[in-house]
Amino acid sequence: MYERTFPTKRFKKTLEFLEENVPPPAKILDLGVENPFSEIMKQNKYQVTNTKGEDLDLDSNAVKSNEYDVITAFEIFEHLVSPFNVLKDIQAKKLVATVPLKMWFSNAYQNKTDLRDRHFHEFEDWQFDWLLEKAGWTIKKREKWTNPVNKIGFRPLLRKFTPRYYAVYAERS
């Protein structure tokens, strides 16, 4: 997944946001297959279970359990055609999620060789807020951060100042 680059800044900011809003040792269902950030959460004393790679648009049974303190979804909802259905079906009372923000100077991400590695949505913050609220969540905390890249050019310059990631902590209304 991270053959050439490792998102150190994003992982650091995500962990800080998670710890601030849901301190360990919370029991987490992390949407998406096991990944490097799942391991980081475990190393920081969280009890983490990952979904198995099922298509959450078609099968949201994994989130219908109330055995977890919190559902985490880091860079997941942009891949779903209908994130509303999954958000509505979640039984846990807390949610921590991050999504990439839509950037006016860049097209949505698309991996042409991997059908699962594409963004159906890239959100504006108000769109993700509205989606959460319609699905029955109350947002308690929000944070945005940039994703600078070490390249030369107009778009890399804009990435230094334009927020790329949006993190939300929400509770069931």
Image (spheres, rainbow, N blue to C red):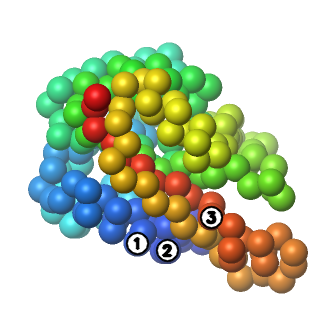
Dot 3 or dot 1, earlier in sequence = 1
Reading the image, the residue beneath label 2 is 9
Q: How far apart are marks 2 and 3 (CA)?
A: 13 Å
Please state the horizontal and vertical placement of residue 14, each as a whole percent of the image.
40, 63
- Within 10 Å of disc 3 (Cα), the crowding (few <14, some 14-19, many 20+) is some
- The residue tagged 3 is 163
Decide which of 20, 43 is in the foreground and name it.
20
- Compared to residue 74, the image places residue 16 above or below, namely below
Left or right? Give the position of 110 relative to 36. right
Residue 111 in the image: state x and y as whole percent: 73, 46
How much space separates mark 2 and mark 1, taking CA atoms?
5 Å
**Relative to 96, is 129 above or below?**
above
Q: CB under 8 Å between callouts 2 and 1?
A: yes
Residue bearing the label numbered 1 = 12
Q: Nearer the viewer, residue 4 or 90?
A: 90
Which residue lies at the image location 33% right of the left edge and 47% below the top edge?
A: 140
The number of discs equals 3
Q: Label 1 near label 3: C-beta < 8 Å?
A: no
Viewer-side label of 3, 1: 3
**Residue shown at the point (49%, 67%) measured from the top left:** 10
Nearer the observer: mark 2 or 3; the answer is 3
Which corner quadrant holds the C terminus?
A: top left
Quarter occupied by the N terminus: bottom right
Question: Is 128 on the left or on the right of 154, as rendered?
Answer: left
The x and y percentages for residue 139 are 37, 42
Query: What amino acid is found at the position of numbered circle 1 in the picture?
Result: Lys
Toward the right, the furthest residue is: 154
